[in-house]
Amino acid sequence: MKKYIIIFATVVVSLFSSCSQQQKKLTPGKARQIAEEAYIYAYPMLEHYKMMFASAMYPESGAYTAPFNVLANNSRLNGPKDTIIVRPNNDTFYSSVFFDLSGQPQILEVPAITDGRYYSFQIIDMYTHNIDYVGTRKTGFDAGKYMFVGPNWNGEIPEGINKVIHSEGNYLLALGRTQVFGPDDVENAQKLMTGYKVLSLNEYLGNVSAAVIPSNPEFPPYNPQKVADANFITYLNALMSQGPIHPDEKEMFGRFAKIGIEPGKLFDPENMNPEIVDSINEGIKSGMEKIKEESMNMGERKNGWQLIADSFGTREAMKGKYLRRAAAAYFGLWGNDLEEAFYPETTFDADGEELDCSKHDYILHFEADELPPAKAFWSMTMYKLPEQLLLDNEINRYVIGSATKGLKYNKDGSLDIYIQKENPGTDKVSNWLPANNGQFSLQSRIYWPEPDELDPLYAPPAIKKIN
């Protein structure tokens, strides 16, 4: 026993000696530079972990939905009373499950879709890469069984599995969206969602009768102060322990190691030179400034609409785009691939003035060949500003689009949408989007856009004042 204690002590001393020697070679300027780069890299992971911790690990968070490997369905349309999340969606119901693949693979079962309804499960890893999709665009309307496996699984694929989706790490999020055709379609959509199932591999094979809920990973509890200072390294080291470093990033992590970043390694800023710690904090601050600045430059503006592209996708699509990936997480976590959904947004009219229905009424006119190019469906959602929330109104309409019942097209196939605070009258109310008595933002959602409209990006027509 004494022999092992001596060996262990020797290893610990060696590690601290190596760390100390490395820090002696590290200048404050270099520490600041590395910290900035590392924080930009880590930021999306920290934001993702914040939500994973609140949703699946901490029942008292107020945002808790279900433990790992348990599917949660939110089968209620958002309305004006929903104020926790800004810019809520009124088109779809949501489903979600955080997968823990460390023990065994997990299987997502989906039913056949018989009414042409759009649905999707966006599969997001800890890096915030969209590693795959299950749904209308990617897998069609047929029933299916999709197995998710972690980096260390080497078993046999059981019969009946449509596809195996491999993850770099042990933790994934499957974020589901199910189209609701309108308020009178709620029960139909809810019934469909009961067909979504999550099973462990052992359950699927009939080896157990009930799921075994895994324990929470040994990650530090999320703390908003600690993820914003040198202690972010503690979180990054823990999160990086859930899978191997990608070969493309080994050189980068070699640089990161100079300030204590290493998967699974303990980090304690108290054991570091205070000057180096101060420099790391300065690097974090400058990194955050760059993230915010980049979030303002994520796409072009055309016809007054902000068109965001190249901000979400697979590891291959986002290769080397660490600042853009971080800015995207800051702008809106878990965005879809452009091929899955496209979200033009505007707060300006055709004259470049801010949209304000306390001053003007507006019209959004689509020529027949200008309608949003959606293979699934499209919509326009009204958000009052500055709250970025849905607006209470006399007809309980918060969104208008291709699924709106009674929408009237002109004889030539064109479409007029009336955007104003007052009811435009019985002949136009079918095409009325009630507006805020003040400034507002209009958010377009185009689900499964036509591929040839993505390069160059489609932009809706400019919104014009009604004189």
Image (tube, grey):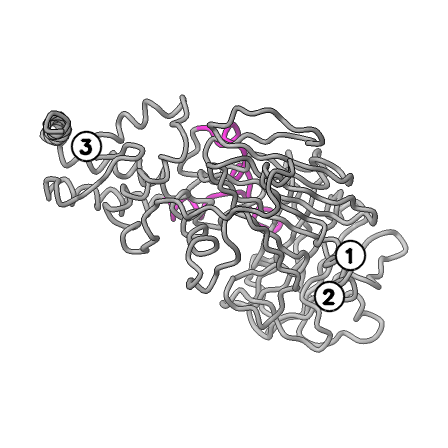
Circle 2 Cα neighbour tier, 10 Å, few/some/many (<14 / 14–19 / ≥20): many
Mark with earlier residue (1, 3): 3
Q: Residue tagged by mark 1? A: 403
The relative height of residue 170 versus residue 430 in the rendered view (above or below) is: above
Check if mark 2's residue and mark 3's residue have beta carbons within 8 Å: no
What residue type is disc 3 on? Lys
- Point out residue 160 in the picture as x, y percentages from the top left corner: 71, 31
Q: Is residue 68 left or right of residue 402?
A: left
- Point out residue 153 in the picture as x, y percentages from the top left corner: 50, 27
Outermost right residue: 411
Q: Residue tagged by mark 2? A: 418
- The nearer-to-camera label among 2 and 3 is 3
Tag 3, which secondary structure?
A: helix
Residue 298 lies within the magenta run: yes
What residue type is disc 1 on? Ala
Residues 19 and 70: in front is 70
Tag 2, which secondary structure?
A: strand
The relative height of residue 165 versus residue 302 in the rendered view (above or below) is: above
Residue at left 30%, top 49%? 227
- The nearer-to-camera label among 1 and 2 is 1
What residue type is disc 2 on? Tyr
Q: Residue tagged by mark 3? A: 30
Q: How far is disc 1 from disc 2 in space, using C-alphas? A: 17 Å
Residue at left 58%, top 65%? 383
Q: Quadrant of residue 286?
A: top left
